[in-house]
Amino acid sequence: MKIIICKNRIIITGKAWEIKTKLRKYSKKYHYLTEWLAAVNGRQ
């Protein structure tokens, strides 16, 4: 499983169950993808 975080996108590769698990984990902390990208890139 790999998670590649770029400036304006997130690429998740792996098995379907791994991706679903990771998305569930991150959806508890971030409601929108833009919030996740902003937190990772250091923008508020």
Image (spheres, rainbow, N blue to C red):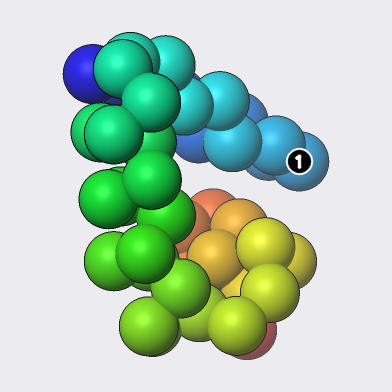
Residue 5 image point, x, y percent: 50, 34
- Location of the N terminus (image quadrant): top left
In this rendering, is residue 5 above or below 39?
A: above
- Work out whether residue 33 can be spotted: yes
Q: Nearer the viewer, residue 9 or 21?
A: 21
Label 1: which secondary element: loop
Q: Give the camera-side residue of 33 and 16.
A: 16
Task: Evaluate whether residue 42 shows in this view.
Answer: no
Image position of 15 (left or right of 5): left
Q: Amino acid at mark 1?
A: Asn
Q: Hey, which quadrant is residue 14 in on the image? A: top left
Image position of 2 (left or right of 39): left
Q: Residue at x 29, y 66 (%)?
A: 25
Q: Quadrant of the C terminus?
A: bottom right
Quarter-wise, where is residue 37 in the image?
bottom right
Number of residue marks? 1
Mark 1 highlights which residue? 8
Badge 1 crowding class, 10 Å Cα cut-off, few under 14, some 14 to 19, many 20 or more, is few
Q: Position of residue 8 (x, y in %)?
A: 76, 41
The residue depicted at 59 percent of the width and 36 percent of the height is: 10
**Residue 11 screen position, x and y as percent:** 56, 25
| Farthest residue, direction front | 17
42 over 30 or under it: above or below = above
Is residue 27 positioned above or below 28 on the image? Answer: above
Residue depicted at x 42% and y 55%: 23
